[in-house]
Image (cartoon, helix red, strand yellow):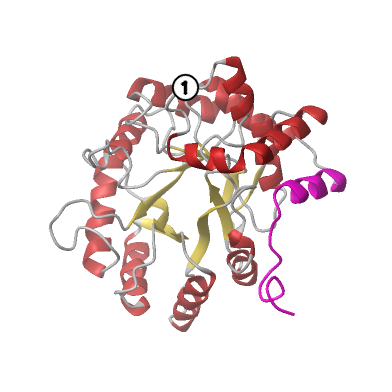
């Protein structure tokens, strides 16, 4: 397994991050435990979760995913010690005030609840799941500084931030002589490249690592049309991505044809492309089986030459950094 540093830190993480959003909702606990064991066996040490994961269609059972991970840690055998654990705070965990967002009280309550569910004494990467426009950075950073001093978290990351949010956060942290953000988790894949405008330049400027989520865009870049023809695509496999498939069917077909032409699995090609992008630390993969996990790991062996990268840019046009993308 290839490893790299997370942004400008000395923290070493695998170049693939195991996403756990399906645990408890689509993946039973026993299978989730097997997947995490297999991930360790394959050298993946970076796991991502969130306090709100595990909820059902009605929004119930928030926190269940962290509980599943916590019971896996409790089995011992070095499971916690070998894992770089990332979770998130922001989601409203109940209807009561201060059960969500990023006030100092919400952050404190959020980390304590996550630590209980995870059966851990600290969180390696504590990520703000969304920007909180109602809470000043002075309050957020003071709360995070306390948690670092207490040893309850080690690093702070963001998720779904705009480029200017990252700049604002980092300048506020700098004024406090605090490390600030070390990573940003954003939607990024061949179909969704808006972060190339301003988020990635901000990450490069401030030394943050990019952790792309939905690298296969809900399965659209994972050979969906081939599976459709073969009758192996589950009726609910794409979920919210069904409308996107109708919109991009011709482009997806051309993409799958190109993957066949160069002898690469579509999913592996999409992951390999992400791994070649500036600032990317580790795409988040969400396998449901060990076979899918192994297929994702295979992307690390895919080498993309300039001709291949140019062809992918033709199929899925990207962005130059702003303002050149839309001005001179």
Which segment did they paint magenta? 306-328
Q: Please indicate, yes or no, whether residue 119 appears anywhere in the rendered image.
A: no
46 vs 107: above or below: above
* Element class at badge 1: loop
63 vs 110: above or below: above
Residue 36 belongs to the span the image colors magenta: no
As drawn, is 92 to the left or to the right of 188? left
Depth check: 162 or 157 in front? Answer: 162
Q: Residue at x 20, y 58 (%)?
A: 99
Q: Position of residue 36 (x, y in %)?
A: 46, 29
Depth check: 203 or 176 in front? Answer: 203
The residue most toward the left is 96
Is the residue marked by circle 1 packed among few (<14), some (14-19), or many (20+) residues within 10 Å?
few
Residue 321 belongs to the span the image colors magenta: yes
Depth check: 21 or 194 in front? Answer: 194
> In the rendered image, which quarter is residue 279 located in?
bottom right
As drawn, is 262 to the left or to the right of 134? right
Q: Position of residue 255 (x, y in %)?
A: 71, 37
The residue most toward the top is 231
As drawn, is 181 to the left or to the right of 254? left
Q: Please indicate, yes or no, whether residue 158 appears anywhere in the rendered image.
A: yes
Mark 1 lies on residue: 234
Q: In the rendered image, which quarter contains the N terminus?
A: top right
């Amino acid at each position: 397994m290839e490893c790299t540093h997370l942004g400008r830190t000395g923290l070493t993480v695998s170049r693939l991050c195991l996403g756990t959003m399906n645990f408890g909702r689509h993946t039973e606990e026993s299978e989730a435990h097997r997947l995490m064991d297999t991930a360790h066996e394959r050298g993946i040490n970076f796991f991502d979760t969130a306090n709100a994961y595990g909820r059902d269609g009605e929004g119930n059972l928030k926190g269940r995913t962290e509980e599943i991970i916590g019971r896996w840690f409790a089995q011992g055998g070095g499971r916690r010690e070998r894992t770089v654990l990332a979770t998130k705070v922001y989601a409203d965990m109940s209807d009561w005030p201060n059960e969500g967002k990023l006030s100092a009280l919400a952050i404190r309550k959020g980390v304590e609840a996550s630590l209980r569910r995870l059966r851990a004494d600290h969180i390696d990467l504590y990520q703000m799941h969304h920007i909180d426009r109602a809470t000043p950075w002075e309050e957020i950073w003071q709360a995070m500084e306390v948690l670092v001093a207490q040893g309850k978290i080690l690093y702070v990351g963001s998720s779904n931030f705009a480029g200017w949010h990252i700049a604002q956060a980092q300048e506020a942290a700098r004024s406090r002589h605090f490390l600030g953000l070390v990573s940003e988790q954003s939607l990024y894949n061949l179909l969704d490249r808006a972060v190339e405008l301003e988020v990635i330049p901000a990450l490069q400027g401030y030394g943050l690592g990019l952790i792309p989520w939905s690298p296969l865009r809900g399965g659209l870049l994972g050979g969906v049309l081939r599976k459709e023809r073969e009758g192996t695509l589950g009726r609910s496999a794409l979920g919210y991505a069904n409308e996107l498939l109708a919109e991009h069917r011709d482009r997806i077909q051309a993409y799958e044809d190109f993957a066949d032409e160069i002898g690469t699995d579509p999913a592996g090609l999409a992951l390999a492309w992400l791994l070649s992008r500036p600032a990317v630390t580790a795409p988040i993969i969400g396998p449901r089986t060990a076979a899918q996990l192994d297929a994702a790991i295979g992307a690390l062996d895919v080498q993309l030459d300039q001709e291949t990268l140019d062809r992918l840019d033709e199929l899925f046009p990207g962005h130059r950094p702003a303002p050149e993308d839309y001005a001179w």
